[in-house]
Image (cartoon, grey):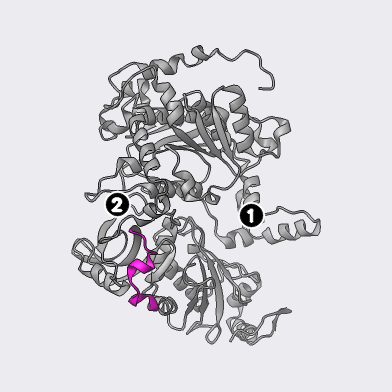
Amino acid sequence: MSSPDEDPPTEPERWRDLDMLLSRPGNLVHADFNPSPGLRDSLGSLVEVLVVGAGGLGCELLKDLALSGFKNIHVIDMDTIDVSNLNRQFLFRVQDVGKSKAEVAAKRVMERVSGVNIVPHFCRIEDKEIEFYSQFSIIVLGLDSIEARSYINSVACGFLEYDSDDKPIPETLKPMVDGGTEGFKGHARVIIPGTTPCFECNIWLFPPQVKFPLCTLAETPRTAAHCIEYAHLIKWNEALKRAELFGISGVTYSFTQGVVKNIIPAIASTNAIVSAACALEALKLISGCSKTVSNYLTLETLNMVLFEVHYFSLTICRYNGLDGTHINVSEFAREKDCLVCGPGTLIELGTSTTLSEFIKMLEEHPKLLMSRASVTHEGDNLYMQAPEVLEQMTRPNLGVPMFELLKGAARTTVHVTGMAENNGKKVSSLRKLRVTFKGVEESSKMDESS
Amino acid sequence: MLNLFKIKGQKKEEAANTNGRPPAKKQSPGELRLHKDIAELNLPKKTNITFPNGKDDLMNIEITLRPDEGYYVGGAFVFTLQVPPTYPHEPPKVKCTTKVYHPNIDLDGNVCLNILREDWKPVLNINTIVYGLNLLFIQPNDEDPLNHDAAAVLRDDPQKFRRNVQTAMSGGYVDRVHFPRCK
């Protein structure tokens, strides 16, 4: 980089340790692992990795992945470099302030690690077509928001398909490694949709944000936090007016939150440790050089000595730098009926089945027994039982064949809500359904390829 | 478990069906949960709900409350609910777009209702919010004021408060502040 104080290692030297991992057998390797010196080349040529986020974690991740033998990497980040990033986002320099994080990070890593190709995407994750995400073998997340994680999780889980026995189809798997840091704390977790819990399965683990009563903020503040929240919430419009008065653009709510958030200290070493764990998990998932993740179900039997030597045999590891380094592992369980990664209930329809016949079928379906169902499909509300205004708007759909309402897809996912039986009681339920149509081929593929 | 062997298989499969299904629009778990909440709405009488952006955007809701008892009988009060993508982990943002003389609603439409902020729980839903807002009109609360003057009047002189509410709802001035008619 700008001040090369030592020469980078020569090529064979740089890959020595990785080659040892990939070319030797071991007790912890995956059943399909075939150690060979050529494995590193395959890793480089076959695998495409997506890194989401090019901030504190993202910079570390790009470097770690590039040095772990991944050669085709994409990175996506909507942010530009701020001067306050420079203490820890080590790929950036003062003259980069204002430029795209993704673009600068990609360029710097490529300069340093020869043979690596990093494609930057300077945009929001939601701006990319879903199709964009399908090209990657694995997605590594270095994000700072629940919202963005939830989005990527739903995209990755959206690719997952189940066979008729509700078993995940391996070819449709899109695993994720999720890293996260806040001050001295961090986590790294492996998400294999359909096998390990997805992000949504245990989203309830996140502690609720501390919120103060509005009237306390306005009338009887007692703490410093109350005063800051007051400015943030109630005097917000004055900030907007002030910006307008002085002709300053860019005072948006999200920017303000960014300004406020930067006060939370971000610690470079936490990022480094979490990123190293994530990169290692990615390498193991892809190469099989450790059979860790497939052995997920036996995690509980591991003891502390094993943790220290092979902490990476575990699904989630936490590190806490405040009281010395401490790594702990929890095994989370999947949510059986998870709307995002669960299989849902398989239902086969004829192409002439109408929406009202479909709703009737749900009442009789032994796995559902759902009455008064409302139906939604990819953002289209096909039928709503209530409120009246929506019922009236969606009523004309009742006589229309489902095949038409679902836009001629041979198979697709539909969500229904209604009263369904659970342990002999009727309770309000939200269910995911995999709808397929009898006698309909996966038509679009044939048409487009011919 | 994914490994290089399987990735080779994937690449082959991708090559075979050059274009899979057309990419689908993702429905977030929050949207699905909201769909359920809306389909199960059981609103108080004379409460009206509309969706300004049509039947496929449930994230923006407009609710008109018409209290049937208390100081505000006869008035109609419009609230906007903006549901965040993180719903139900975060509550909807609620604003009162009708300018109202009320101890717990300020003149900018900010609402002080515990379940909208500090006491929000993911088990609560749109229905609970509507009932909570309704309760604010049936039992305005002088202990947690957002409009300090209105709260003081309610506490010290309920009769005057009643007159002030009537004046405001009929489209008049209370303490030199004009309130548009909302009956």
Q: Chain of mark 2?
A: A
Distance, label 2 to label 1, CA atoms, is 38 Å
Q: Determine which residue is flagged by label 1.
A: A253
Residue lying farthest right?
A: A246
Corner quadrant of residue B16: top left
- Residue A99 appears in the rendering: yes
Is mark 2 in CB contact (under 8 Å) with mark 1?
A: no
In the rendered image, residue A241, in percent from the top left (x then y), is placed at: 75, 61
Residue in the foreground of this view, choosing between A218 and A36:
A36
**Residue A183, relative to residue A438: is it above or below?**
above
Q: Secondary structure at mark 2?
A: loop
Q: Is residue B6 left or right of residue A101?
A: left
**Residue B1, relative to residue A363: is it above or below?**
above
> Earlier along the polypeptide chain: callout 2 or callout 1?
1
Corner quadrant of residue A414: bottom left
- Residue A196 appears in the rendering: no
